[in-house]
Amino acid sequence: MEKFLHITPHSLALVLSRVCREDAEGPPSSPPAPAEVWEKLEHHTGYEVFASFKAVNMQHFWNKALTEALSEIFFLGWIDEHVLLIQSQEVHLEVLRNTWTRRTLKPPQGFHIKCIGG
């Protein structure tokens, strides 16, 4: 029996967790950070989270492989409001895995990346 469920070929799952007030720096009396304001919205659509993920990481203009990979990924799904599914060619998914391993891949606004599975 397989340990992992294969959902679709050439896909990647980003397991996210929401940013909590305790995770934010500064005393509780400080004004909320933009990520916290965004987090307080009742509901995020999966595509909004995906768009935020791409926008935040496209700022890595010095990492040509990452910006190319981000331009080639597609939104696949949003599960239980914390798992973002993306699809692309395997070479682009490998770039995302590598940048996450090197801690240069940034999470969507209002979230942390707990792990990446594929």
Image: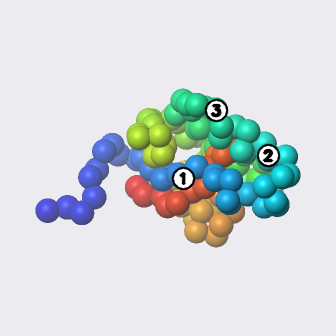
Q: Image check: 111 left or right of 78?
A: right
Residue to which mark 1 is pinned: 17
Taking the spot 62% from the left edge, 62% from the top edge, the residue there is 99
Spot occupied by residue 40 in the image (x, y as percentages of width and height) = 65, 37
Say which label, 2 or 1, has the lower sequence index: 1
Would you identify the image quadrant in which residue 47 lies?
top right
- The correct choice, above or below, for 66 with respect to 55 in the image is below
Residue 86 horizontal/vertical position (percent): 48, 42
Looking at the rendering, in which quadrant would you find the N terminus?
bottom left
Q: Is residue 48 left or right of residue 77?
A: right
Say whether residue 87 is visible.
no
Q: Secondary structure at mark 3?
A: loop
Q: Nearer the viewer, residue 19 or 21?
A: 21
The residue sitting at the bottom extreme is: 102
Camera-side residue of 97 and 81: 81
Dot 1 and dot 3 residues touching (CB under 8 Å)? no
Q: Position of residue 67 (x, y in %)?
A: 69, 48
The answer to whether residue 93 of the structure is visible from this angle is yes
Q: Is residue 82 left or right of residue 26?
A: left
Labels 2 and 3: the sequence-earlier one: 2
Q: Amino acid at mark 2?
A: Pro
- The residue sitting at the right extreme is 30
Q: Quick one: 78 or 35, which is closer to the camera?
A: 35
Q: Amino acid at mark 1?
A: Ser
Give the residue at mark 2: 32
Single out the mark in the foreground, 2 or 1: 2
